[in-house]
Image (cartoon, rainbow, N blue to C red):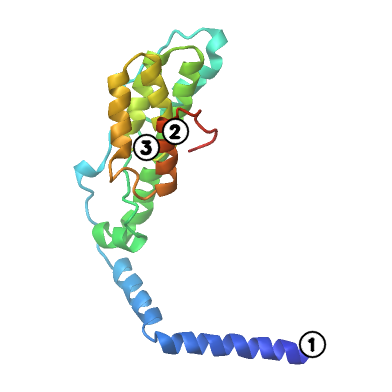
Amino acid sequence: MYILATVIFLTVILNYFLAKAGNPHKAEDLEEEERKANAARRRDLPPGMFIAPEAEKLPFSDNLKEDKARLARAQENARRLIGEKMVKLQPEMSNNDLKYAYGVARLDELISFDENRERFVKALIAWAQELMKYDMNAEARAVLEESLHMKSDYGKSYTLLYDVYLSLGDEEAAEKLKADVGAEGFLRHLPSLREKIREYMENGSKAEEGGE
């Protein structure tokens, strides 16, 4: 047992030094990159970076009856998030890229702003689904279009909106959405989800349950 443990230990050590010899500067380069990123000064965020919810376009109602309690809660969940700051971080930007661009002190702040946007998009999708249960598809349309304005990365924003367009007889809007989804740059960072959305619109299958 002792001999086996010794052999394993020596093998790990040998592999470490072989890897280091193969690329002796990699670890040092990463450390230097991290050091420089952490030294970047705090910079103001450009106003154009923020995405403001279009509250005036959303179909809020203060007269929902008691039998629509779930709908009321979904609506309020979305309303509660409107005042939060929101951004869409570019998926190709690493944490170090963000530090370089805006300063290390901004990193957690930027991540929280992006999370606010995601939470708002999820709340919009949930609201739209409740509206659709009551055949309030015109209202669901406005809510789902807002989720696209917020640069949604969730498949249901697109598949549900496609269904809503068809249910309202707006084939022109449905075809335009389908063309947008087929564009080369659409959800480039999420190729699997992108293909699911495209397949959905081609085949007319039902939207999958879950976040996507």
**Depth check: 128 or 55 in front?**
128
Q: Which residue is mark 3?
A: 152
Disc 2 and disc 1 in contact, CB within 8 angstroms = no
Task: Say which amino acid is labelled 1.
Answer: Met
- Residue 30, given in percent of the width and then of the height, sits at 37, 75
Check the image and report above or below for 102 versus 75.
Answer: below
- Mark 2 and mark 1 lie on one chain; the one further toward the N terminus is 1
Check the image and report above or below for 125 versus 191.
Answer: above
Q: Which residue is mark 2?
A: 200
- Mark 3 and mark 1 lie on one chain; the one further toward the N terminus is 1
**Depth check: 161 or 196 in front?**
196
- Residue 155, given in percent of the width and then of the height, sits at 43, 36
Residue at position x 51%, y 7% in the image: 65
- Does residue 167 appear left or right of residue 97 in this picture? right
Q: Is residue 11 visible?
A: yes
**Depth check: 112 or 13 in front?**
13
Q: CA distance from mark 3 to mark 2?
A: 17 Å
The quarter of the picture where residue 43 lies is: bottom left
Task: Say which amino acid is labelled 3.
Answer: Ser
Disc on res. 1? 1
The image shows a total of numbered marks equal to: 3
The quarter of the picture where residue 96 lies is: bottom left
